[in-house]
Image (tube, helix red, strand yellow):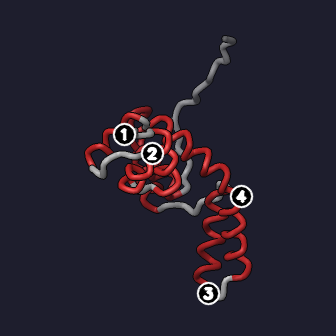
Amino acid sequence: MPDSEAFIQTYVETGNVMSSLAEGGYKPNRNTGYVLKKKHQEEIEKRMQERLRQTGPKALAVVENLMDNAMSETVRLGAAKDMLDRAGYKAYDENSIGKNIEEMNQQLVALVGKDGAKLLIHSMRTRKTISGPEIEAEVVDA
């Protein structure tokens, strides 16, 4: 009789649908494997997350070892970048910076209009002061 528990466990350990089917006592059929994966998706994901949590410290040790002891400078640099990235010190991505600038320009135009945005950007580039009416802000308690 087929055993879905054995299928789930083998799939989590190997990622191989066909061997998971065989281990669970199912006929080797990719469609059956697809149906079982879909049916037990939550349990498979839960177990995969737990497995990743358990292997995290070992993976960290491997990356640290590569960073400190790899013969190749490229490997050491890659490991160091990976460690910094995981610690939240990711190098900037020029594509995302361009997108952020575009978003900021759109927000500026929405706030002060197209001409006002051009004037502000020009003054920032030339570092000139802009003369105009003083704006007084009133603090309102919420």
Where is residue 71? Give x, y as percent.
Answer: 66, 88
Q: CA distance from mark 2 to mark 3?
A: 41 Å
Disc 3 is placed on an element classified as loop
Q: Quick check: 21 left or right of 76?
A: left
Q: Mark 1 and 2 residues: CB-CB less than 8 Å, in contact?
A: yes
Of residues 24 and 109, the one nearer the viewer is: 24
Position in image of residue 54 (x %, y %): 67, 51
User: Quadrant of residue 49 in the image?
Assistant: top right
Q: Element under label 1? A: helix
Q: Looking at the image, is mark 3 or mark 4 earlier in the sequence?
A: 4
What residue does disc 2 label? 7
- The kind of residue tagged 2 is Phe
* CA gap, disc 1 and disc 2: 8 Å
What's the distance in space between the residues labelled 2 and 4, CA to CA? 27 Å
- Could you say which disc has been placed on residue 72 in the image? 3
Rendered residue at 73%/78% (across/down): 68
Residue 114 visible in the current orientation? yes
Q: To which residue does mark 4 refer?
A: 57
Left/right of residue 102 with respect to residue 43 in the rendered view: left
- For mark 4, give the secondary structure: helix
